[in-house]
Structure formats: C-alpha cells, structure tokens
Amino acid sequence: MHLIIQASGEDASVVSHLLAKNPNNIYDRTDKGVRVRMVYTRATSSETEVLIHAEPDPVDLVRGSPDGYDITQYINDREFVTSSLFCSYIRSALGTALNGKPKEEYTKWVEHPFDLQLSFGPVASDLPDRVVEELFSHLGYAVTLEREELSYSFDLKKRSSVRRIILQGKETVQNALRQLFLLIPVLDNYKHYFISEDEIDKIKRYGDGWLETHPHKELIVKRTLRFAELIKKYESKEGALSIPDNKPLSVEELEDGRDVLTEGSIEASTETSKDAPTDDTPVRLNELRYRAITEVVARLPHRQRIVDMGAGEGKLSARLATIAGVESILAVEPSGQSRLRAMERFAKLEGRHGVFAVPEPIIGSLFYFDEQLQHQDVMILCEVIEHIEAYRLDGIMNTLLQEYQPEVLIVTTPNKEYNDVYAMEQESFRHHDHRFEWTRAELAERCVEWSAGTNYTYTIQGIGEQVEGYGQPTQMIVFGRREEGHQQ
C-alpha cells in the first residue's frame, strides 16, 4: 500500500517543508508491527516526488482481536490494499501537513496551491469506475484509473475490482491529504476500528471547504458513519442529507451487506420497533427481500421446520422466528464470525413476546451433505447462489431437490437486467464476491433444468421496484413439492 505525492513547477521544493521531512533523509519507522517509510525520489527546486509506503505484519493485524481465532481473518487483502488501515498508519508521519502547522517561515505556503499528482493504491473498491472518478473530479482533479490484468486461468471475473488511482490538479498539500484521508476509506468501505462520534468530527475537519457542495456528499457521509444513529447525529449538527432529484439511489444504498446506511437501522421487527422504517424512510432492498420471504413462509400450510442456508449474522432467521406456527429454525452458516454474531442476535430473542422459535445457529455449507437438513418444511437460500461458481450450482441444486427434499425451497438472486437502472458498468457485479448474475430469461432457463426429473414445480416473482423493460432488482423462485401421484 502506497501513496506517491508529486509537485511540479516553481517552488515545488517547499512541499518537503510542508511535509516536515528532509529529502536527504529516509523516514523509516516501525510502530505496532507496521513499518512506514517516506522516500524522496526527486527533490529539486521545480520538482518534488515522495513515496509513502506502509508494510504491516499480517499476523499482527488480527493478533489479540476478537476475530483472531477465525482463519478467514488471515486470508484477506488487508495487508496490501490502500484502506482506512493505510490512512491510520501514515497519519503520524503526515501530521504536520494535515494540521497545516509547518515551521513558522513556511506557514504562508499552507494555503498555496501546487501542481500536484497523487498516485495511490491498490484500492479494492465495490464502487463502479464512474463513481470513483466523480468523487475526485468534482474536486477539480483529472482522474486516471489503472487495473492489473487478471491472471486467473478460469472464468471467475472479467476484470478486477482493484484499481490504482492517479489524480492530477492544483491544490494545497493540506487539502489534498485531507481529501484522501476522508475518501480512501469511502472507496474501500472497510473500517478496522470502532466507529464513534469522533468520525463526525473527522468529517467536519477533513471535509471543510469542499464536502458541503460535493454531489456525492450523502454517499461519503453514509459510508464513513455507517450507523443510522451516527448519521442522525451528523444531520442534527450539519443539516439533513438529501438525494438530489436527478440522482438515483446507488446500488450500495439499496443492496444489503455493504452497510452504506446502517448495520442496525432496519433489523428484524423483533429487535426494536423504533428502528422500523417509516413512510418517509426509503426501504432497503434487503428489507423487501425479508418481507417477501416472510410473507411466503407465513402462507405455507407446513412451516414448522425451517432451514436458513447461508444465514450469515441471522437477520432473516430472526425475522422468521416471529411467524406463528414455526417450531424450529436451523441457521446454517460456515463463517465462525458470522455465527457468533447470529448467536448474540438470537440470545436477545429468548423469552420475547411474539417469538415462536429461537433460531439455532449451526455450522454447515452447501458443499457438504448434512442429513439433519433432510425433509424439512422450508429451506431458504437468500442471496446465496450468486456467490457460488456457476459450474458447481447444478450439483448443489440437485442435492437440495433430490436429497434434502424440503416441502418448499425458496431462492432469491439478483436480476442482472436491473443493474442498468443502477447505472452500473457493463459486466459489473453488485458485490465483489458474486460469481455471476443472471437475467430473468437466464434464471428461467436454469429453473427448467433444475426441476426436470424432480417432484417440484416452481414460480418466479420479482422483489423491489418494478421498472419497465428491466423488471425488479431481485428474483425469487419458490419450488414446491408436487402432490403424490403427479410426477413430472
């Protein structure tokens, strides 16, 4: 992970004084397992170039953390990508420049705009190129995005979501760094620390002079604060966030999991009624999925035993627990971290009025057969199949319909056609871990194949706002067992 700052033109050498680092010395510090180096590769009166590089210890990244037991914490990109971690690593090295307090004789240069080129990366971002470019172009930068060629020997993705970003423009060193320190975590959308009210102060400090008029202010604020409670506190101090009439909601604001709005603003109705969406609150797509699935299950004549495959942190399972007639819910999830969070969620349901069955979190995977999942009343795969390589899916669906044989199987998956409504780039996926996304016709074709030779019929319906020509953002398939004597 690195940042390169280049300044050119008359008085470019002053930049080294604003950074408070002598070009003749290498800044090399190791603190808490992270080595940070600043090296000047050019230092003349008309040109200054400095490389800022951070190299963390991957084991120290998780040592002593609550999730340190989970091997998946060691298999990630945090050691390499430019994220909120990188900003925290280099903050002390750039403290003088960020605060605008160099030696007295150079104070006058704090407000001086230089011809700058800022290069940083790699950045792993779920945002499309268009949004990444607009985040910086509205600040006056010319933006260049570079991608590495994929070296996969199999067809997983057509191109990488990892990019290197190059910005060129006229800006003060202080403002340029403050913009990067606020926007880099927005790009990566990952926070390695507890998000508190301090983040509101950071937004105000680093966003001073540019954020208020930025067209993507809402996206920046929500991806920085994440939680509804903090967003409301920000709005009480700075004024309500609003979506311009000509700016559609981004897919991140409608989709689940990338916590643009909140982890807890719209939870299962069993948690707190005060968090339920009101008439004035845009309803998230994931909330609509939960509602649609819950309504289907509530109408089923047999709904005593439910399996929620890929249950994650248990939000859907908690919602299903409020359906009358439900006696057991198996929340199946392979991630230990997610199961722990599900356990905490389910513990809050114990003894609650209106809860008919407290879900049971169990370890499991679609790739392994588990006999206790056989012959259940309802099995649900909510936004799961698109995370599986398409070539493996036929075998998994065969196991579900021929081996597990639930009375009803409910599957939801994105509608690829609707990505155009989100103004997404061609061949982009809604989530970085998606292996595929299908059109309505493609899904219908696969359902014909999956149900052939089985004792199931199926219906397909949409979830979410209908747009003519594009359908609805989510597709839901409900497979139901035929009555005896009516084989296909």
Image (cartoon, rainbow, N blue to C red):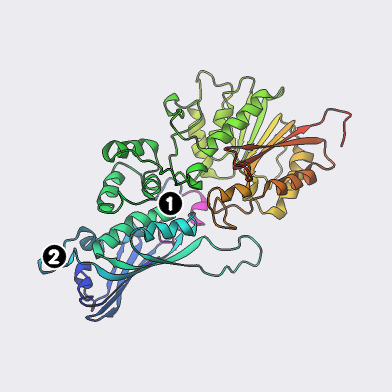
Rendered residue at 47%/58% (across/down): 130
Check disc 1 and report its element: helix, strand or loop. loop
Check disc 2 and report its element: helix, strand or loop. helix
At label 1, the amino acid type is: Asn
Crowding at mark 1 (Cα within 10 Å: few <14, some 14-19, many 20+): many
Does the stretch in magenta take in 81? Answer: yes
Q: Which corner quadrant holds the C terminus?
A: top right
Circle on res. 107: 2
Q: How many marks?
A: 2
Q: Splitting the image into 4 quarters, where does residue 487 fall?
A: top right
Rendered residue at 72%/22% (across/down): 301
Residue 482 visible in the snapshot: yes
Q: Which residue is disc 1 drawn over? A: 189
Provide the residue span drawn in magenta.
Answer: 68-84
The percent coordinates of residue 264 (x first, y second) are: 44, 35
Chief SS of the magenta region: loop
Does the stretch in magenta take in 158? Answer: no
261, 367: nearer the viewer? 261
The answer to whether 224 appears left or right of 410 in the picture is: left
